[in-house]
Amino acid sequence: MIENSNIAILILAAGNSSRMGRPKQLLPWKNTSLLNHSIQLAHNLNKGATYVVLGANRKMIIPNIIHRDINIICNDNWSFGIGTSIKSGIKIIMKAKPKYDGALIMLADQPLLNTHYLHRLIKIFNTQSGQIIASSYGDKSLGVPAIFHCSFFEELSQLTKNFGAKKMIKKNINHVKIMEAKHLITDIDTQDDYDNLYKVNHQL
């Protein structure tokens, strides 16, 4: 890990989990919840401040966040897509003092991620050059978790509802370094998705 790098951690958790039928952020995971698990991963990195973007169901979610040393950002435009959540978070991060070298963007529903993988992302991040460290999903698709150099902050702060992290990565592919994360990325969209993943990862 580059000890002197100053990286903000941005966790996106604003969706309404329409296919799940209840807030994914609060689903049980490893003696806590999916969102609390993601926040703990962020804290384990011992990097910059942690920012959590909430939107739908935030009045239900906030009282269940056990970590108080985080920055909660409310995205009232969450229904217009993930790009609005990135935009909301980056705008706040851009105002921070001292300025951040980059931002690590994560999702609240990728529970197989671990601190070791996130440390590896940070380790290859070069604070001196404009780059993106993106995760490969194994199907030629690239996405988060990803670290965006601060030179991309202005562009991230202008994202629209139809433009998220994946499109940003594709647009700037010449500046992208890739890490394989297929074994750590899984979709949790439905109750069956969650039940199957929970059963496999909570064996006694």
Image (spheres, rainbow, N blue to C red):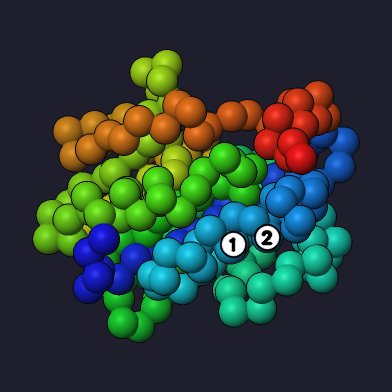
Nearer the observer, 16 or 83: 16
The residue at the point 23 percent across, 37 percent down is: 176
Q: Secondary structure at mark 1?
A: helix
Residue 85 image point, x, y percent: 56, 52
Picture quadrant where residue 177 is located: top left
Q: Which residue is mark 2?
A: 36
Disc 1 target residue: 39
Q: Which numbered tag is attached to residue 19?
A: none
The answer to whether marks 2 and 1 mark residues whose Cβ atoms lie closer than 8 Å is: yes
Name the residue located 17 percent from the left edge and 56 percent from the top edge.
126
- Kindly identify the amino acid type of the residue bearing the numbered disc 2: Asn
Q: Identify which amino acid the numbered label 1 is placed on.
A: Ile
Q: Position of residue 181 (x, y in %)?
A: 42, 32
Residue at the outermost left position:
128
Residue 170 appears left or right of 20: left
Q: Taking 45 as reference, is 123 above or below it?
A: above
Note whether residue 189 is visible: no
Dot 2: what SS?
A: helix
Quarter of the image holding residue 132?
A: top left
Give neighbour class at mark 2: few <14, some 14-19, many 20+ (Cα, 10 Å).
many
Quadrant containing the C terminus in the rendered view: top right
Q: Quadrant of residue 69?
A: bottom right
Q: Nearer the viewer, residue 21 or 86?
A: 21
Rounded to the nearest angstrom, the CA distance separating label 2 from label 1 is 5 Å
Tell me if residue 122 comes above or below residue 91 in the rendering: above
